[in-house]
Image (tube, rainbow, N blue to C red):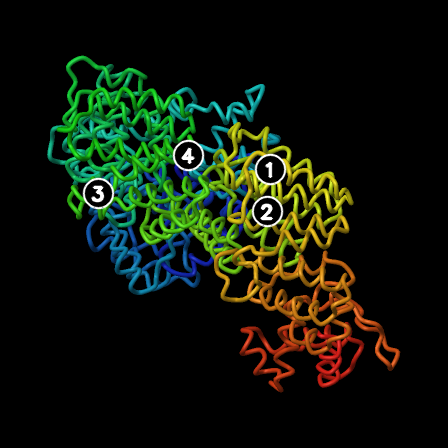
Amino acid sequence: MLTARFAVPAVPKLLVHRPELLKRLTAGVQGPLTLINGPAGSGKTVLTAHWVADGLAPRPPVWLTVEPDDAPGAFWAYVLEAFHRGGVVLPAGVGTPTRAEGVTRSFLVRLAEGLAGRPQPAVLVLDQFDTAQPPAMTEGLDFVLRHAVGGLRIVLTSRTDSLLPLHRYRAADEIAEIRHADLRFTDEDARALLDEHRLEISPAGVGLLMERTEGWAAGVRLCALAMQRSSDPEAFLRQFAADRTTIADYLLKEVLDTQPPPTQDLLLRVCVTDRIHPDLADELTGRDDAARTLAGLARDNAFLEQIDASAWYRLHPLFAEVLRAHLRQRHPGLEPRLHGRAARWLARTGRLTEAVLQSAAAGDWQFAAAQLVDNLAIGRLFTGLEADQLGRAFAGMPIDAEDVTGATDAAGATGVAPALVAAACRLAEQDLPGCEAALRRADSYLGPDSAPAARLGRAFLGVLAGRLAEDPEATERAAADADRLFRELPPPLLAGRPELRALVLAGLGAVELGAGRPDRAEAALTAAVAACGEPGTEYPHCDALGSLALVAFRRGRLRRAAEHARASLAVAEQSALPPARRSGADHLVLAGVAVEQDDLPAARRHLDLALAATAAGPRPELAAVVAAAVIGARLAVSEGDGEAALAALRAVGTAGAPVRLPAWAVDELAVAESAAHLARGDFAAALQVLDAVDAVDAVDGDRPEYAVARARALLAAGLGDQASEALAGLAGLAGLPGDEGVATPVRARACLLRAEIAAAGGDTEEARRRLGEALGLARPEELRRMFTESGPWVRRILRGDPHLARLHGRLSSDTPVHARAAPADGQPVVVEPLSARETEVLRKAAQLLSTEEIAAELYVSPNTVKTHLKSIYRKLCVTRRSEAVHRAQDLGLL
């Protein structure tokens, strides 16, 4: 008898305490069987030894370490000796095994009966009880356990699932299981172990360690030991290579070397792929036993696991890394050939992305590029979950890969596929010169007889390159070619590639927007949104919605702009779109809407988010650059900082914009700059900037924004007659709802200016009428800011017309428009303005709805409504609901 086999292993000095698992062990021994199952180094023995050492078992356990070559008779002799040394007294009649090869059934009966007669059950820990044990041993153990009538509790630690009939114990709820997933270290466990080793590692470093080890206890511990010997532990984690550490020795000796030679060969060959299918494994080994071998390895916890009960398997990343290093050492030159074989099998079975990655790893750039081009999958380099992965795969492709002598791809032209993929990779990095050079090489191979797939790839890239260059003519030509080729290709093939059409339409719409063609832009972008919705279209979906929001905002359709912007944000959040693929147009538009609706804190918040997105994302296009400058200047003016407004506008010329800006951009910037000068009280400068644009671009009545801005500057300078002349005769500026040719904010501003001119001339009736028209135009879009900044004359007119103030009260409830003299009772007007939600609650209260009915109308709880009402009473200085309604009506808030 080897005494060491009865000794409880020593608990490591640097120990991670895992109280939840210890509790589960203690609870488990209330039943007959507890199984702790996991791969080598997962902490099975350490956990059980810790449990024993801390005295957490209901009674002192008996420990036995099982050896793989134990014969049944020898095993039972060791069990009896363990009972004897552990103080478990058995009847003398139980006897002992008489031969090493086995025991009689009568011995097992006597042992079970002897255990059943004990006043307290014995707890037996069988450490390392694996499937290598003879079936007779597990059958005998099962017999004794079932017939001991509660007199025996067994704790098994095992790398493999025991041959015990576990299904029967599960059905009877007589087993407690702690498996690999439970044994994996959490981030907190890893942090605790690193602290024990006195290693100060950042959260990012701990995350990287857990990513590499996947919580494998021995891997974390071995890394911690290696980091202790490193002068820079954080750098060790970043540069960590499993094949150059003690982890490699551990895995090779404890896992690989324990397998038979055919299994070792299979593991070395399949390690070149991230996922392993039995048929793929057979392709790589040239055998037909992979299904059985892989299932056995997964069952035995040999660092290979089945993926979601499918036919696929995966190796632990550290084990795969070690195997690949061992493959290169044992079979030099074999790895690229295995990658090539795997690529072709994956391509035949329709797994395109994996085929591309494998062929790229093999250095077979022709095959890799042809997979993307021939299968119309080149759009995957720009959108979808695999975009970054594919981009990294082609990062190593030589510049002249498409010039390989004699290479002909399936696209029908020598080298065209690598040239197109090279162009796509340059585009993804926003390297326009590199893209154009690769496209010229592709054009040298393409001809009228080239396959439609290659020609569509060229047209598709032409649209994206035209967008990056902000070249409307080139973009439109390429989009027309793409549209024609879409009709030539099989619909089923295109149906599986929705990202192509979505990216083409989104690119075309963005370019049309930058060219100042909002109608064309809206049509293309609306079609782009309609083409999205399938997996892989998240980026163009978000992009097109953001551009649509910009179109609507420039047209003064604030509600629609905000809807598109919020939809864009929702798509980005739901699909976890990375910052590098977000343009920030959504936040930019929401900032612009918030300014016009006079919600300055929200405007500042959204503008900051938009600028942060611009810094992290793709280079902003002209439409976004101009919008950011105009909205930023408008917000700065609203905050009283005219200098900051001018600085934001003048920065456009140094932000990468074209030397010659299009007319629409010149107008928008000039109008915004004129407003900034007015805010500073510099009327001459406000007129001068508009006159400069007039002299260069011959402004006429087709550009009403300019005319309204000029009229505003003239009026501010005291030139009311000239302001009136500037507005006279301009089509679409009558201020009536039927004037659809001009943006609503421009029409509302024109009516407001006419009202101000009338008020300045003493024509109160005309001023009241024009102000009513302006308020009516502003109501649908909730335009508030223009009234806030118009001056005290608006307040005077509203004070003299309570009906008009009451009619449009909600529009400006948060603005100074409704400031009033104190009512006759001497009470203050309002303590502070009502919020938009409080105004909604008050409006419902005015309709005599109950608290519950208001809650149902607004989709909130009754308690929330009560909270809003209390706030309303405080702000309006009243104590009852009816008083609040009357006071709000008097103040024009309703």
Q: Nearer the viewer, residue 684 or 844?
A: 684
CB of mark 2 within 8 Å of CB of mark 1? yes
For residue 386, side relative to residue 795 (left or right): left
At which x and y percent is residue 139?
Answer: 22, 51
Snapshot quadrant of residue 762 = bottom right
Q: CA distance from mark 1 to mark 4?
A: 95 Å
For residue 704, side relative to residue 484 (left or right): right
Snapshot quadrant of residue 418 = top left
- Mark 2 and mark 4 lie on one chain; the one further toward the N terminus is 4
Q: Nearer the viewer, residue 760 or 233?
A: 760
| Other-residue count near label 4 (Cα within 10 Å), few / some / many at <14 / 14–19 / ≥20 | few
Q: Mark 1 or 4, which is nearer the eye? A: 1
Which residue lies under the disc numbered 4?
4
- Mark 4 and mark 3 lie on one chain; the one further toward the N terminus is 4
Q: CA distance from mark 1 to mark 3?
A: 43 Å
Residue at position x 66%, y 43% in the image = 633
Q: CA distance from mark 4 to mark 3?
A: 75 Å
- Mark 1 and mark 4 lie on one chain; the one further toward the N terminus is 4
Q: Is residue 302 visible?
A: no
Which residue lies under the disc numbered 1?
693
At which x and y percent is residue 168?
Answer: 26, 60
CB of mark 1 within 8 Å of CB of mark 4? no
| Other-residue count near label 3 (Cα within 10 Å), few / some / many at <14 / 14–19 / ≥20 | some
